Image: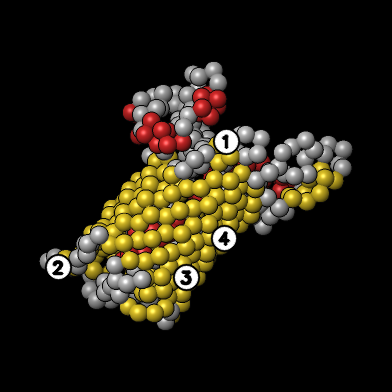
């Protein structure tokens, strides 16, 4: 149907990085293959403006910072979440997420997750109305990780990820529709201080650093290759322990894609990017913007989130996300809530777009379920 095809085309060209008019003589948004990897796949992070590298551990830490699992307070955790995408256009495009971890002991943990991005059913017809059939394009990521405490306050983790991109339409004559395949590696670190008594409250510092999706370009059967979204993310947080029941957790995070910046002065910028190596581009992406350091700064996104927690039973969340207009113009406010009863938790979040560029997640209610079991390890 018409709207499904429009929705597919928007997603195929990276609608989550829509480009505003270039008013600052910069090159515009950076796009990669598998853009769904950059979409927040859980409701708790979604309620705090898409951040999770330095927030307190939860079952969904795999996407953000697997090193947090070493500080998980329960022996076993499983979480599942559904994120509708382009909900204002179609009703069957979703991002599904299933994640879980197992503490091996007080110092280590293993985890795994599965993310599945489905474009639903695409009805194809040519200009004469001839039916080409129905397609169900999708992308997925499957990963495992191992986290280890280096000491009582610092942990690190490594994760391996299999990536598959099957968005091409097999019914179009003459098109090679074989799926693309690649893999990525995450290297992450997490710091959590002891509980520090201040004059009127107890406090705890948190910090996180994550390099995610480090790996080769995704390869398609006809030899085409595209960069996967290799990303660097850093964050800092502080928890205010008002009393034994009430806590306020604040977090500030920064993120930057580690892939080449297209140079619009290049006569064939896409060929230049295709010739660049995936690993070498991680380092060159720090100073390859045509506009120099000022443009490199505009490629950094910023988010601030706050979470109020009452006795680990009820939580309220809010956040703000900012991306420069010349680099995608994603700007939004989020609200969220969490409820926990015994071992079961429910999280909700909602996004309010504040940019002139439409957001594919505007008006989207994300829902997540978490199940925690087993032995207690770390007391907050």
Q: Position of residue 363 (x, y in %)?
A: 56, 55
Q: Position of residue 91 (x, y in %)?
A: 67, 57
**Callout 3–callout 4 Cβ contact below 8 Å:** no
Q: Which residue is mark 2?
A: 197
Q: Is residue 26 visible?
A: yes
Camera-nearest residue between 14 and 163: 163
**Crowding near the residue tagged with mark 3, few <14, some 14–19, many ≥20 C-alpha atoms within 10 Å:** many
Cα separation between marks 1 and 4: 26 Å
Q: Is residue 319 visible?
A: no
**Crowding near the residue tagged with mark 2, few <14, some 14–19, many ≥20 C-alpha atoms within 10 Å:** few
- Element under disc 4: strand
Please identify the quadrant where the C terminus is shown: bottom left
Relative to 120, 153 lies left or right? left
Of badges 1 and 3, nearer the viewer stands: 1
Q: Which residue is mark 4?
A: 96
- Element under disc 3: strand
Chain-order first, disc 3 or disc 4: 3
- Residue at the image position 82 percent from the left and 39 percent from the top: 126
Relative to 20, is 16 above or below?
below
């Amino acid at each position: 149907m018409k709207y499904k095809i429009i929705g597919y085309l928007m997603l195929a060209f990276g609608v989550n990085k829509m480009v505003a008019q270039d008013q600052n003589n910069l090159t515009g948004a950076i796009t990669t293959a598998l853009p769904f990897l950059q979409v927040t796949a859980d409701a708790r992070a979604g309620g705090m403006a898409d951040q999770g590298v330095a927030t307190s551990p939860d079952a969904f830490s795999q996407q953000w910072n697997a090193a947090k699992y070493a500080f998980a307070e329960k022996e076993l955790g499983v979480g599942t979440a559904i994120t509708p995408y382009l909900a204002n256009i179609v009703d069957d495009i979703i991002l599904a997420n299933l994640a879980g971890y197992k503490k091996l002991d007080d110092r280590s943990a293993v985890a795994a997750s599965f993310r599945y991005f489905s474009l639903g059913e695409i009805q194809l017809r040519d200009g004469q109305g001839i039916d080409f059939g129905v397609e169900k394009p999708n992308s997925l990521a499957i990963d495992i990780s191992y986290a280890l405490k280096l000491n009582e306050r610092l942990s690190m983790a490594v994760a391996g990820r299999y990536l598959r991109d099957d968005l091409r339409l097999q019914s179009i004559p003459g098109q090679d529709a074989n799926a693309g395949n690649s893999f990525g590696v995450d290297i992450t670190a997490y710091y959590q201080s002891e509980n520090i008594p201040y004059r009127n409250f107890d406090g705890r510092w948190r910090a996180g650093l994550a390099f995610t999706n480090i790996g080769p370009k995704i390869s398609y059967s006809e030899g085409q290759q595209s960069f996967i979204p290799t990303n660097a993310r850093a964050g800092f947080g502080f928890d205010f322990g008002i009393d034994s029941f009430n806590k306020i957790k604040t977090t500030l995070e920064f993120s930057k894609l580690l892939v080449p910046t297209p140079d619009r002065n290049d006569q064939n910028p896409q060929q230049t990017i295709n010739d660049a190596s995936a690993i070498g581009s991680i380092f060159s992406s720090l100073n390859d913007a045509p506009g120099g350091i000022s443009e490199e700064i505009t490629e950094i996104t910023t988010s601030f989130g706050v979470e109020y927690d009452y006795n680990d039973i009820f939580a309220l969340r809010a956040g703000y996300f900012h991306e420069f207009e010349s680099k995608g113009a994603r700007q939004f406010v989020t609200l969220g809530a969490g409820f926990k009863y015994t071992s079961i938790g429910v999280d909700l979040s909602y996004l309010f777009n504040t940019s002139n560029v439409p957001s594919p997640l505007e008006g989207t209610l994300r829902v997540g379920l978490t199940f925690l079991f087993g032995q207690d390890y770390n007391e907050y």
